[in-house]
Image (cartoon, rainbow, N blue to C red):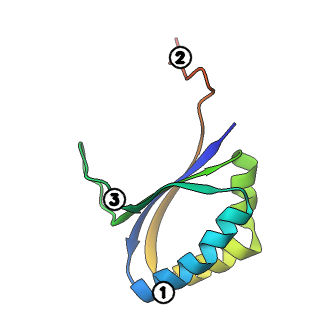
Amino acid sequence: MSAYVIVGVDVLDEEAGLAYAAVAQPSILSHGGRYLVAGPTPEPVEGTWGFSRFLVIEFPDMDRIQEWYDSPEYRRAREIRKSAARVRMLFAEGSPPEGFSLPA
């Protein structure tokens, strides 16, 4: 079942952010990830969204996300990112095709 990486980013250093993206993007693609949303934070409808960029990345499953996150390529990207951005990241399982139901 598909799984998702959901990211909120505050860019602190544009140049370092570009260096991070140059390493992170190929690592995501090589592990079967694809960007569904990538760009400035959409206009909030409810609540406060305190970050400048928002991403949703789809992977084939949670195992592939973990392989990507722990890969040498992405560890290198995370090192570059340390001075470039503040990041909030979630890993989330997708819903089965028939949707989800609330617990009884």
| Distance between mark 1 and mark 2 Cα atoms | 45 Å
The numbered mark at residue 103 is 2
| Distance between mark 3 and mark 1 Cα atoms | 20 Å
Q: Earlier in the sequence, mark 2 or mark 3?
A: 3
The mark tally for this picture is 3
> What amino acid type is highlighted by mark number 1?
Ala
Residue 39 x, y percent position in the rendering: 40, 63
| Distance between mark 2 and mark 3 Cα atoms | 32 Å
Q: Secondary structure at mark 1?
A: helix
Residue 83 in sight: no
Residue 2 x, y percent position in the rendering: 66, 41
Q: Residue at x 46, y 67 (%)?
A: 87
Residue hosting label 3: 41
Tell me whether circle 2 and circle 3 mark residues in contact (CB < 8 Å). no
Q: Earlier in the sequence, mark 3 or mark 1?
A: 1
Label 1, residues with CA under 10 Å away: few <14, some 14-19, many ≥20: some
Left or right, 82 with reference to 77: left
Residue hosting label 1: 16
Residue 64 x, y percent position in the rendering: 74, 53
> What amino acid type is highlighted by mark number 3?
Thr
Label 2, residues with CA under 10 Å away: few <14, some 14-19, many ≥20: few
Left or right, 22 with reference to 60: left
Residue 28 drawn above or below residue 75: above
